[in-house]
Image (cartoon, helix red, strand yellow):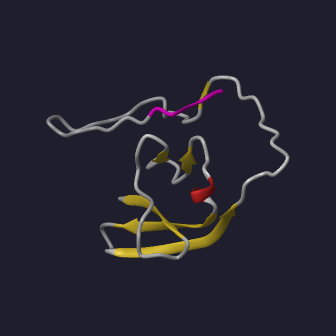
Amino acid sequence: GLSYTWIFNNNTLYVQEDSRCFVSQETGNLYIAKVEPSDVGNYTCVVTNSKAAQSVQGPSTPLTLRSDGVMGEYEPKIEVRFPETTYAEKGSSVKLECFTLGK
């Protein structure tokens, strides 16, 4: 299947998931909570096809900080849209992803 990772500032270092950073394996989106000055830079998504053992890089996306201090308010909502039915083979492992936004 496909897997998603992100590179920061064209480094060979991948963005590490922690309490602030989350990479959706459903959509490929990178989410960063409480952006800090050290997060400013360019981010590049890498999509890997494990069956073909190939990776493709997307375009670089810049992240900048707003200087006006304006922060939008977000109502709580679930971001990931689930399929109506998830099929799984008996004895296999299934990972369900739930991601929420809010402030």
Is residue 24 positioned above or below 64 on the image? above
Residue beneath the point at 61% across and 47% down: 35
**Is the magenta region chiefly helix, strand or loop?**
loop
Total labels: the figure holds 0
Extreme residue toward the right, this view: 68
Is 5 magenta? The answer is no
Q: Is residue 42 left or right of residue 50?
A: right
- Whether 72 is drawn above or below 56: the answer is above
Asked where in the image residue 65 lies, by quadrant, the reply is bottom right
Quadrant (top left, top right, bottom left, bottom right) of the N terminus: bottom left
Pick the front one: 92 or 27: 27
Q: Looking at the image, which is closer to me, 85 or 65?
A: 65
Region rendered in magenta: 98-103
Q: Going 48% across and 47% down the picture, which residue do you hit?
A: 21
**Which residue is nearer to you in this view: 44 or 71?**
71
Q: Residue furthest left?
A: 91
Question: Looking at the rendering, in which quadrant would you find the C terminus?
Answer: top right
Residue shown at the point (55%, 34%) measured from the top left: 81
Q: Residue 20: x percent and y percent?
A: 49, 43
> Residue at image x 63%, y 27%?
102
Picture layout, residue 25 above or below residue 41:
above
Question: Where is residue 60 shown, x and y percent of the image?
Answer: 63, 71
| In the rendered image, the vertical position of residue 68 relative to residue 97, given as above or below | below
